[in-house]
Structure formats: C-alpha cells, structure tokens
Amino acid sequence: MRFSVEALRAEKGAVMLLDMRKELPPIDLGRSRLSFVGPVEFVGQATNTGRRIVVMGSAKARALAFCDRCLEEFAMDLATPISESYYRADEPPAAPDEDERVYGDDDVIDMSSDIEQAFVLALPIRIVCRDDCRGLCPRCGHDLNRGECSCSPCGD
Ligand SMILES: [Zn+2]
Ligand SMILES: [Zn+2]
C-alpha cells in the first residue's frame, strides 16, 4: 500500500486519486488472528494541504477470523473509512498531532500498517461467525451449532 507523493508535493492543493490493491500479512489480534483472503483494497485520494498530505478514502478486504463463541474459522468482509494525515519527517508542521504519521525523504507513503490498524479498530468487541452462533457447551466443549450434546440442557 505504497505510493509516491513526489509529484503531489510540487503544488499545494494538488489532489491525487488512489486505487490500490495489495496482499498483506495476517494481523495478530492477541487472542486470535485475522488472515486476509486476496488483496486488501484502498480507494480514495491524497491532498497536499501545504505541510501535510491528507489521505481520505475507504479500505476493504475479505478475511478469515476465528469465532469467539464456537472457535471455528470463518470468512468476514472488512470495510472501514480511512482518514490519515502524513508529513515528511524532515519538514514537520508547527504543531503536529500525535496521531499524525510520518514519511521519509524518499517521498513514499506506506499506508499498510495504518489500514491494518483501522481494520482492527473497526472490529466488533466479540467476533462471531453469525449472530445466532450457539457457541460451545461450557461443560463438554461440543459445538452446539452441530446439534445438542448429551449434557443436561438446564446446565446443572
Ligand atoms: Zn461461531
Ligand atoms: Zn455438553
């Protein structure tokens, strides 16, 4: 998810359209993992606002995740708006915000980790394969989506 801003930097107010696709490695979520199926897509635009390059757009991808209830792997669609501000490391604005990003003197912005972070922030607190996933029996661990187990239905 890299693009050069060399031409964009020439003129304040200049806008560049972005339409990128790239394979990204899996994201470690701590308790589980998100692996992308096919390329991650980003469509949007980059604007030279003077000291900064502001990137707005949306990212989407299909990913395999593990259900927090039944622990099965399933495919989910990810989509999130992206709004990031970048400045060149050797040309910082007077008062950069702490969430602003930096690029180097090669004039290349790499959005990969920013897009990964946006996907992670957009995830629900509990990732479930479907709303009515019944999860695992707390006593024997049987996947209740595949039918009842032989434990007492009242749970005692
Ligand atoms: Zn599930
Ligand atoms: Zn059971």
Image (tube, rainbow, N blue to C red):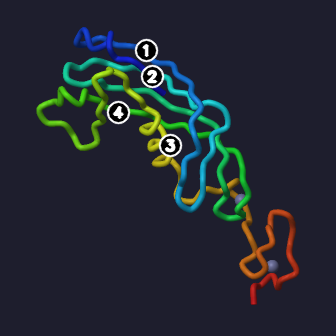
Which residue matches tag 4?
84
- N-terminal label among 2 and 4: 2
Inter-mark Cα distance, 1 to 4 = 15 Å
Inter-mark Cα distance, 1 to 2 = 6 Å
34 up-or-down from 80: above or below: below
**Residues packed near mark 4 inside 10 Å, few (<14), some (14 to 19) or many (20 plus):** some
Inter-mark Cα distance, 2 to 4 = 11 Å
Residue name at image x 57 percent, y 59 percent: 126
Query: Is the Cβ of the residue at disc 1 closer than 8 Å to that at disc 2?
Result: yes
Residue 49 image-quadrant placement: top left
Residue name at image x 88 percent, y 81 percent: 150
Residue 104 image-quadrant placement: top left
- N-terminal label among 4 and 3: 4
- N-terminal label among 1 and 3: 1
Which residue matches tag 2?
44
Query: Amino acid under label 1?
Result: Leu
Query: Amino acid under label 2?
Result: Gly
Query: Is the Cβ of the residue at disc 2 closer than 8 Å to that at disc 4?
Result: no
